[in-house]
Image (tube, helix red, strand yellow):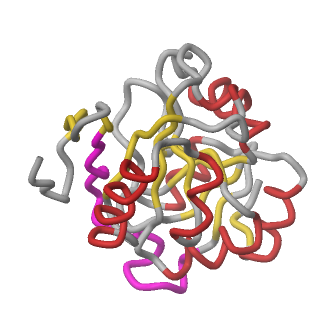
């Protein structure tokens, strides 16, 4: 499938297809949460590796997580400090989260708001999407949209060749992943954001 415009990409995501677009870190493979099994298939990804729910803005996150008022205040404080940005928070999942996003442990969900206008614009049109890096499992994340189109010819890939760096956008570094333990944060993956826990 050729590189496509943002409007075409949004249409196809809203029709249940896997799509790819840049983020502030590495480009994403993304789909509606209920279509998450298609991402696992495409990446040949193990079901014990959950996907991340990406949204255009912070308020959208809260319907997808559950916690006490005190916990939510702590989550909100961290989110307001680091979002939009390269931090993924793993929080207790609400019933609204599709179990397909985390097949072996649907009790939690990783959530993030990317710091890239292009990605936020797409997410505003699609609503929250299940996301992961654009690569086959076990391979390094692909950073160029043209490389993603070559590796995954069956999916729509956003045409960014008129953007800076001819289709390479983002830091190339993965997000930091921090999981809520009930009393504080545990770093699951250290990325570009340094969280003092």
Is residue 139 located in the magenta-colored stretch of the structure? no
Front-lying residue, 154 or 66: 66
- Residue 63 higher or lower than 179, as above or below: below
Q: Position of residue 74 (x, y in %)?
A: 31, 56
Residue 141 appears at what percent x and percent y? 38, 44
Tell me the residue at 20%/37% (across/down).
Answer: 187
Camera-side residue: 39 or 49? 49
- Residue 76 position, x and y percent, is 39, 63
Q: Residue furthest right?
A: 15
Q: Is residue 195 left or right of residue 13?
A: left
Position of residue 128 relative to residue 17, above or below, is below
The span shown in magenta is 160-178
Residue at the spot 47% in from the left edge and 64% down from the top edge: 113
Judge whether 87 appears above or below 138 on screen: below
Residue located 55% across and 56% down the image? 54
60 with respect to 11 (left or right): left
Task: Please name whichever residue, 16 or 163, is drawn nearer the observer in this view of the structure.
Answer: 16
Q: Is residue 19 above or below residue 138?
A: below
Q: Quadrant of residue 72?
A: bottom left
Residue found farthest to the front: 69
Residue found 44% across the figure and 40% down from its top = 91
- Left or right of 76? Residue 113 is right
Chief secondary structure of the magenta portion:
loop
Residue 165 lies in the magenta-colored region: yes
């Amino acid at each position: 499938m050729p590189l496509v415009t943002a409007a075409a990409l949004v249409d196809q995501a809203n029709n249940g297809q896997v799509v790819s677009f840049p983020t502030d870190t590495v480009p994403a493979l993304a789909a509606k949460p209920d279509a998450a099994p298609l991402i696992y298939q495409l990446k040949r990804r193990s079901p014990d590796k959950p996907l991340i729910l990406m949204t255009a803005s912070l308020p959208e996150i809260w319907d997808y997580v559950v916690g006490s008022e005190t916990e939510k205040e702590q989550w909100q404080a961290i989110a307001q400090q680091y979002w939009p940005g390269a931090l993924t928070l793993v929080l207790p999942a609400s019933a609204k989260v599709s179990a397909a996003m985390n097949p072996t442990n649907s009790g939690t969900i990783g959530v993030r708001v990317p710091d890239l206008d292009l990605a936020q614009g797409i997410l505003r049109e699609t609503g929250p999407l299940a996301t992961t890096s654009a690569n086959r499992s076990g391979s390094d994340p692909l950073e160029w949209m043209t490389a993603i189109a070559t590796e995954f010819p069956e999916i729509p890939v956003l045409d960014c060749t008129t953007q800076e760096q001819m289709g390479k956008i983002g830091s190339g570094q993965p997000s930091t992943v921090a999981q809520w333990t009930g009393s504080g944060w545990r770093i699951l993956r250290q990325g570009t954001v340094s969280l003092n826990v």
